[in-house]
Amino acid sequence: MASGERGSTGMASKRQSLGDAKLAKLDDFYTQLSDIEKELRHYKKHFKGKVVYLNCDDPRESQFFHYFSYNFEKLGLKKLIATCYKSQNMDVFSEVDSERAVYLEYTGDKDGDRVPGRDEIEVKCLNADGDFRSRESITLLKEADIVVTNPPFSLFREYVAQLMKYDKKFLIIGNMNAVTYKEIWPYIQQNRIWLGVTRIGTGQMWFRIKDDAPVKKGQRVDENGNRYQTIGNSAWFTNLDHSKRHEELTLYRTHTPDAYPSYDNYNGIEVGKAVDIPVDWDEVMGVPITFLGKYNPDQFEIVGIAKAPLGEPSKVYPKQTQVSATGVRSTVTKLNDGPALKVEAPPIDKTYYEIDGEYYVQLYARILIRHKRVTA
């Protein structure tokens, strides 16, 4: 499922901080099996003998539940647990709107057909609503070794905080911009959370949505009438090690001042793409946050981030005149929000800033890195 696979975040929004039904619906996305298979195949060694917990997953809809139940023996799992809302009748695969919270336990194939049958899946009712923050859900979380799901993007900060509090291994989906959240960034810098394996970017991951979901940009319909939504730069976040994380990035460019201008308000040079990192520069460099998809902790050190208020700038600008690409002028302080480059002349095709006759452009958040040099 995706941003809250309609599971234990539950539709509990009226009693806890999910907000309202509108917010819950906006978080109602379902991850495709193909995306799950592409990512999970890189972690098989981690699952042997482990209890896996899907705490945002309704098995009627969840492809996560499908993947782990059908690959239970192949992965060597000890137990699979899923928490979700369900209807009052005990048909787990009912299409009736959920009214009752339940959890499921599956401990493997019992009849030899290698299919997780209904009689092999133990279904138990929860006393509370199944929200991942409820006492019952936390008890199940404590039992688990690894959590795998797509939590609600709107609750990503709180969800990750819980995983870290209980020291859980996990593989979850979130928005790439989450790396710039003040609650998430310290874990990234400390190498306690990193990105998964499969490619990131808009349009790289499509989530199935309900037929009555709001119509918006970034949607498509397949030949069977199923609706799908792509959600910004979706990415896998994990603390499970994988081989791609240790692949060395091949570099070939060398530093020149013209090609790599220095920031005006942060210590570092601008590197627009990870492949353009100069091989001969030993000082600080700023790279886009997408660099994390190629980050090898054996090759690079993360020094910090150029984004207020997470990263401390070397200077603060006074109020400035912002000039939009269409020529609209306004007085702002936005230049202090991120890394800035001083330019000789105002660009004609993008927003720029003017202070006392000098011109600046602002870049999106940059991760500040430097090479790790191995000495003999």
Image (tube, rainbow, N blue to C red):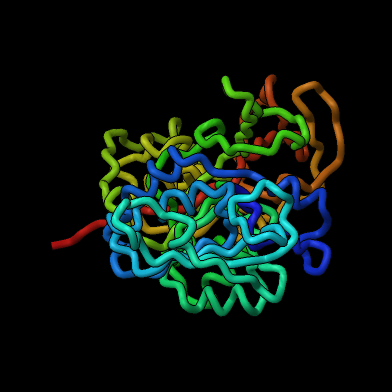
* Residue 141, x across and y down, in percent: 52, 74
Q: Where is residue 95 in the image (x, y as percent from the top left)?
A: 67, 46
Q: Is residue 121 left or right of residue 355?
A: left
Task: Report the side of 77 relative to 334 (left or right).
Answer: left
Q: On screen, 255 above or below 235?
A: above
Question: Which residue is located at x 69 percent, y 50 percent?
Answer: 337
* Corner quadrant of residue 300: bottom left
Rendered view: 70 above or below 272: below
Q: Which sits in the foreground, 40 or 340?
A: 40
Give the residue at x 82% y 48%: 22
Residue 38 picture quarter = top left
Report x, y in % for residue 210: 69, 38
Pick whichever, 19 or 10, lies toward us.
Answer: 10
User: Relative to the observer, which residue lies in front, 226 or 171?
Assistant: 226
Can residue 145 be seen in the rendering of this structure?
Answer: yes
Above or below, 106 against 113 in this view is: below
Residue 262 coordinates in the image, percent (x, y)? 51, 43
Residue at 66 percent of width and 56 percent of height: 308
Write the residue at 54% across / 49% down: 62
Work out which residue is located at the far left of the displayed protein and give it.
Answer: 376
